[in-house]
Image (tube, rainbow, N blue to C red):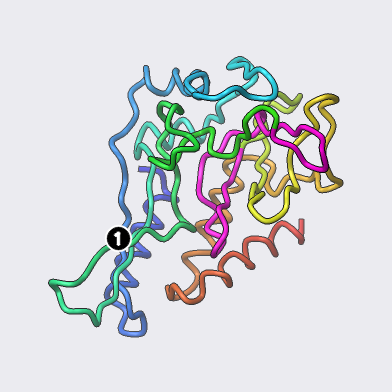
Amino acid sequence: MDERISQLSNWCIEQTSNDECDYELRLVSGVPLSDEELDAIPRYPLDFSFETPSEYRPEAFTVPKRYRQLLSMSGGFRIEYRAKSVDEGQKKWKVWPLVELFRPGTCEAAHYGDAPTLCDSWVTAETELDDREIDLTRFISFANAGISGVASRWCFLIGTDSKEPEIYLEDNDDECVIGHWADTGEWISDDTEPFFSSFSEWLDVLVDVVTRSTFDIKNNDEFIAEIFQHTQQE
């Protein structure tokens, strides 16, 4: 298993046995993806059921090596938690959205809410901002960003000159910040800088931020702030 995933797993075990932590934690990993499934990752968005503002091209999606390696070992993962103080019969595991790497697969369920997909950040054709059509087809969502009360996702920006996709945050529920104008391909705002330069950097920062503290779901926004603070220091 990837050393960073082992670090998360060990941290969950430590939190469960820590008297200062009020929760039990566990790391849940999916079945590893086969070589065929890994090779198919760039083609999964072709299953998207709706018309998009621009054509998606699988060849524009360069799958990061570390991302592929991790999926070959864990097939996606998430941290789940439940309160220690609740009676055994009432205990229910809940997903901590801050640590949830999606398992790539068909994207036809996107916008139905059945399961997270690589296309969850896309908008359909004729979606407008200030009476002008916008496009998010170049953003491939791969993990939940965990922002409280807002649908938020970490995304690969594909179709650039970089050898590996840079990482952006998409949380357009309240205000559309990232994306491109459909007619020109230009950014819709001045917020064009990536949060992370690579998938490896994203994973390293996420795990470091999470495992240096005692878990408390009420401190979710503090974890988020630490991740954001890292990007501001770069």
Residue corresponding to mark 1: 26
Name above or below for residue 80 compared with residue 106: below
Q: Secondary structure at mark 1?
A: strand
Relative placement, left or right, of 48 versus 133 is left
Three-letter amino acid code at the position of disc 1? Arg
Q: Nearer the viewer, residue 29 or 201?
A: 29
Expressed as whole percent of the image width and height from the top left, the position of residue 67 reads 50, 35
Query: Callout 1: 10 Å neighbours few (<14), some, many (20+)?
Result: many
Relative placement, left or right, of 213 versus 176 is left
Report the magenta residues as a range.
Answer: 127-155
Q: Nearer the viewer, residue 35 or 160?
A: 160
- The quadrant of the picture occupied by the C terminus is bottom right
- The quadrant of the picture occupied by the N terminus is top left
Q: Residue sitting at 70 percent across and 49 percent down?
A: 195
Instruction: Write down the quadrant of residue 167 in the picture.
Output: top right
Name above or below for residue 229 compared with residue 51: below
Q: Is residue 133 magenta?
A: yes
Expressed as whole percent of the image width and height from the top left, the position of residue 28 reads 30, 51
Relative placement, left or right, of 194 versus 144 is right
Instruction: Write down the quadrant of residue 185 in the picture.
Output: top right
